[in-house]
Image (spheres, grey):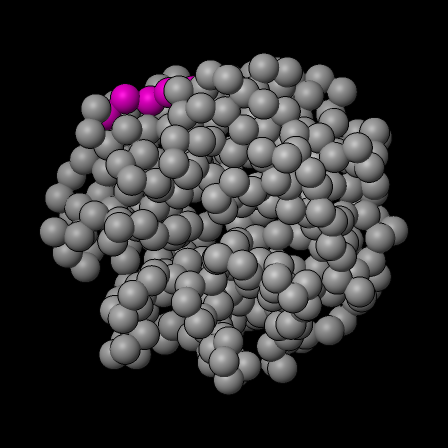
Amino acid sequence: MTKSLFTLLLILLLWIGGPGMAYAAGAAGYTFTTLDYPGAATTVAAGMSGNIVYGGYIDKNSANHGFIYNLESKKYTSIDATAAGNANGQGTFINNVSNGLVIGSYLDSNNLLHGFTCNIDGTNCTVIDNAEAGNQPGEGTTISCIEGDAVFGSYSDPGNHAFIYNMPTQKFTTFDALAAGQDQIEQGTFVDAVAGSVILGHYVDTNTVTHGYLYDMESRKFTMLDDPLAGKAANQTQGTFPSAISQNSVVGYYVDAKGVYHAFIYDIPSQKFTDLDVPGAGADKGLGTYATAITDGPDQKVIGSYTDKNGVEHAFVYDVNDKTFTTLDDPAAGTKNNQGTSANSIAGGAIIGGYTDPADNTHGFVATKN
């Protein structure tokens, strides 16, 4: 699964045990803290910045709201863009938090998308709309990443175009992968992550096959990332899906011709793909392994999830140096089809994700190493 606005894992839950419930876990030496937004019908834990966990929740009317959770004060703050709609499927979506600034997108009452930034307490929200964006339902502007004084995202008309937006100058710079399709809302160029002057993203061609790319903002040059084992069949959700970038490495997954998921690590200097398939991952269509994040520094770790042959999901940590996998299962997770544990991101050694319990209620979590 990718980390775009609409492919975050949606988590159905019953609010049991209260917000921020923590318990010692025997899973790979981690302590899990459950994150259930009070009174919400659904909670998504997406990432963490400092001691702040961010994500989203769905209320009883099926409207979306962003939230932040302070691990020290154990308090939640709801984040709502001023003009966000409050009907089914509408509302506010957070994609990142950096240096006290929340960035994301919202769907208004006319089902048009708008990018936004606001303070971490939910105040002083600023709308970011690309003037070239379409005005039909589902079209508009989305913000996915932030780096320094710039935010990154895409606008649709209906095909998607990636952009860099300089906040001080309020200037958009658009860039498109040459082979990206532009006929449908699913096609076009998208941004997934940023590291320094390099943008990591993906584009969807006219056959709806997905391809990864690196874009150097200084030279304005693309490097395409296509795993040689990725499937290429039209309209089958196949291709290469990058997730994260760190130093000289990219992680993500590809979907092969049989529809099986395979995690990979890509070495940028050598342009070499290496599979990271967890032993025990399922080998049927819709099953397999996907990587979602990678850490900085010499002691690199890759995190992600895999689905076994019974359809149960498990999070994993991969040590790049030792080349070893460690499975990470929340102790409260169920062990049946469509249950289990998934990992979305890693920050400061803490893993952020979600689990589905035996009653098919799913909860966000933060797992910290003991």
Say left or right for 368 vs 133: left
Say left or right for 6 vs 46: right
Q: Quadrant of residue 85?
A: top right
Main structural element of the magenta stretch: helix, strand or loop?
A: strand
Say left or right for 14 vs 32: right
Task: Identify the residue shown where x is 29% and y is 40%.
Answer: 50
Say left or right for 193 vs 280: right
Expressed as whole percent of the image width and height from the top left, the position of residue 62 reads: 57, 22
Expressed as whole percent of the image width and height from the top left, the position of residue 183 reads: 87, 51
**In front of the other: 85 or 172:** 172
Task: Identify the residue shown where x is 77% and y is 41%.
Answer: 156
Q: Quadrant of residue 188?
A: bottom right
How many numbered marks are there? 0
Q: Quadrant of residue 258?
A: bottom right
From which residue to which does the magenta span run? Answer: 74-78
**In front of the other: 78 or 14:** 78
